[in-house]
Image: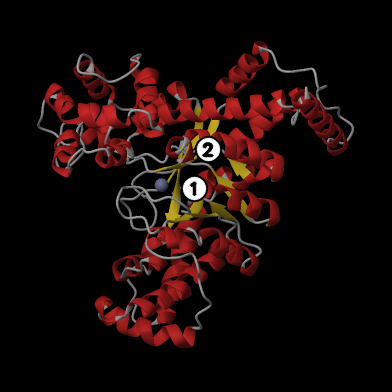
Amino acid sequence: MADTMDRRTFMGAAGTALALGAGGSTAEPLSAVAAPPLASGIRGLVDRTPLIDTHEHLMPEADRIAHADGGDGRTSSDFGLLMSHYTDSDLQVSGLSADDYRKLTTHGMDPREKWKLVAGAYERCRNTGYQLCVREAVRALYGEDDIREGNCEKISRRLREGIRPGFYRHILRDVANIEHAQVNCLQNPILRQSEPATDLLSFDLTTVNLATNVQMSALRLAAGGAEVATLQQAHAAVDRAFSTLGPRAIAVKDQCAYWRGLDFVDVPDAEAAPIFARFAKDETSVRRAERKALQDNLFRRCIHRATEQKLPIKLHTGYYAGMGGMDLSVVRNNMADAARLAREFPDATFVLMHMAYPYQHELTALCKHYRNIYADMCWAWIIDPTSATRFMKEFLMAAPACKLFTFGGDFMPVELVPGHARVARRGITLALTQLVQEGWVSESDVSALAERVMRGNAREVFDLKRVLANQP
Ligand SMILES: [Zn+2]
């Protein structure tokens, strides 16, 4: 049949190309369509290989313990917690009201009553990656296959009982097989200092308050109490933040793509200085365009300092968390803007997060073309699991494997990380298995490839040894 011939011709050509490209190693022969043992072998390999998690928002464990039974507007310690982050967006897009969402995720209501509020919306969106992640989390942590009226109390009780000293290490290491997690703290203006980095957790230095959504309070903090009235003094504050906190940070993180483009124009100091002088007196006095000019000037300063300290710069790119607010006309320029940054700052290392979804093809092209651009699949596996699987597969045939980080849970509640890790491992297994089955990758290369993309690349690019040596 023509169909068979086409396939044979195609696979033959692919085999030749692979043999040529593989420096002497031979591709699998055409007939070697993988049998089930291959798939289960790769699954076992991926399950055994620890992940380095390059992006989380975990709050301090001590805070979770202190507020386990409420207070301070905290999220409840019941099954509502599992529906409080990301999942909530699909639920609300599917009909859950803002008021019911608040009741679901705060203290003060019985789990069964909460279930009645959320059951209808959950049914309407239970197909998505966000909800799959919740189910995988309760499977990994509590041995349940779903949340329903009959087990929501039991899951809630076990979740509450689990909140005790050491539960982060237990969940990340023992349940999720995560070697280390990098945390972007949303509660601290520059870097989390309430706890030191450890073999388990390290922290990003955020440039949001110093530059891309500049706050005078953060600049004053960075200046160590010195006056910040001029651009020169603001630069000194930024420099001081990097010289004092940079050595303790694993990376720089900025999520300004939520409110502006990544087009950081070279605004000369002479132009930015009078704007800053006014801003320092009255933050509301600068117009939108002036504010952007100031952000551009200060963020470029941050890029220089990060480059000197060899801190990779993680940038949010692509899809927006939440619902009802994404301006796609800004998002779709992220990759073109990032390419300009890579050219202008050839010695800086840029990590483009979230697979740039839904512009993941552009991200592959950038990683292939620019030495200093890396792709991070954090959050991507649950935004769109099948696209993430295809992305990984296509990336590995186009861009160097050393440019890919495959996992970040991107969660505030640690309890959801194992669910995300299970979804990711399923996708990684599928991508690698299909590459072998289709004859693109030789079976003997899989083990090294999995090791590299699951943790080896993170070990190469992020200097945890330096971070641990510089803790106070
Ligand atoms: Zn994040």
In the rendering, which numbered label is found on residue 357? Answer: 1
Q: Residues within 10 Å of mark 2 (few under 14, many from 20)?
A: some
**Dot 1: what SS?**
loop
Residue 280 at x, y percent in the picture? 30, 79
Q: Is residue 405 left or right of residue 416?
A: right
Residue 295 at x, y percent in the picture? 42, 72
Is 323 located above or below residue 429 in the figure? below
Q: Name the amino acid type tagged 1.
A: Tyr
Q: Residues within 10 Å of mark 1 (few under 14, many from 20)?
A: many
In the rendered image, which quarter is residue 88 located in?
top left
Q: Residue furthest right?
A: 24
Tell me if label 1 and label 2 are in contact, CB under 8 Å: yes
**Dot 2: what SS?**
helix
Q: Residue under circle 2?
A: 387
Q: Earlier in the sequence, mark 1 or mark 2?
A: 1
Q: Is residue 138 left or right of residue 376?
A: left
Residue 199 visible in the displayed image: no
In the rendering, which numbered label is found on residue 295? Answer: none
Total marks drawn? 2
Residue 385 at x, y percent in the picture? 48, 34
Residue 373 at x, y percent in the picture? 62, 54
Q: Name the amino acid type tagged 2.
A: Ser
Residue 48 visible in the displayed image: yes
Is 339 located above or below residue 164 in the figure? below
